[in-house]
Image (cartoon, rainbow, N blue to C red):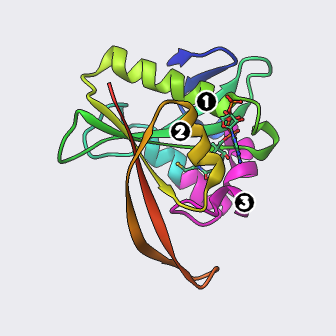
Amino acid sequence: MITAGAAIYLDKLSLDCLEKFLVYRQNPEVCKYQGYDPFTKQEAIDFINKQFPIPVGSRGKWTQIGIYSKTTNELIGDCVSNFQQSEPKNVELGISINPNFQKQGLAKDAIQTLSNYLTNNFDVHKFIARIDARNESCIHLFQKLGYEQEGKLKEDFFDKEDNSWVDLLMFGKIL
Ligand SMILES: CC(C)(COP(=O)(O)OP(=O)(O)OC[C@H]1O[C@@H](n2cnc3c(N)ncnc32)[C@H](O)[C@@H]1OP(=O)(O)O)[C@@H](O)C(=O)NCCC(=O)NCCS
């Protein structure tokens, strides 16, 4: 185990959790506002294998960590951190939660737990979240955690499914 929160703990992703990982990573609703399409089984295996050797805190690399329920020990989602290549004291965070476990405060618990772990073990100046302007749940999550909206990249990318340009919101929390 890496670290624990109130109702979840964070640990490495492993192929033992492949089925639970696919439950949400294959769900179009979970992928909708994120930079990935629903995973195939082989893509999930490759992703977990590729992630496994990357240590948390690696500069310029996305490091994925599993979120596990303390009650059942099952994988319920994953969170990610990226110590920015240009300024490694600034760390971008992201998160995906299985819809069966959403709206229960577990995402908040996971981001708080990850942030505590990172500030306790690394020299962090600021946390960053880049959020699709349509992603209300994610905006609320980071607002509840004390992040401020610092800017908006207008029509930052084109969503082919929606046939529309999408704004990207920049959120940050300076420690
Ligand atoms: C974004 C995501 C992780 C949020 O998870 P969640 O389960 O809603 O989060 P929590 O239950 O911890 O909720 C956090 C807070 O936001 C509030 N909230 C969540 N969604 C809300 C909404 N649509 N409107 C108003 N408040 C909302 C909750 O009530 C809670 O506040 P509280 O502590 O005062 O009760 C989840 O929706 C998800 O996995 N989405 C798909 C992946 C994704 O888009 N990730 C974002 C990329 S960074």
> What range is drawn magenta here?
17-46
- Of label 1 and label 2, which has the lower sequence position? 1
- Mark nearest the camera among 1 and 2 is 2
Label 2 sits on what residue type?
Phe
Label 3 sits on what residue type?
Glu
Q: Is mark 3 within 8 Å of ligand 1?
A: yes
Which residue is drawn at the image coordinates 43% and 40% (left, top)? 148
Q: Secondary structure at mark 1?
A: helix
Camera-side residue of 153 and 90: 153
Q: Is mark 1 within 8 Å of ligand 1?
A: yes
x and y percentages locating residue 137 in the rendered image: 65, 47
- Of label 2 and label 3, which has the lower sequence position? 3
* Separation of residues labelled 1 and 3 (CA atoms): 19 Å
Q: How packed is label 2: few (under 14 Cα within 10 Å), some, or many (20 or more)?
A: many
The numbered disc on residue 108 is 1
Q: Which residue is mark 3?
A: 29
28 lies above or below 88: below
Camera-side residue of 43 and 105: 105
Residue 1 is at least partly visible in this image: no
Which residue is drawn at the image coordinates 71% and 63% (left, top)? 28
Camera-side residue of 26 and 85: 85
- Of label 1 and label 3, which has the lower sequence position? 3
- Mark nearest the camera among 2 and 3 is 2
Q: Is residue 109 left or right of residue 145?
A: right
Are the residues tagged 1 and 3 within 8 Å (C-beta)? no
Q: Which residue is mark 2?
A: 142
* Separation of residues labelled 2 and 3 (CA atoms): 19 Å
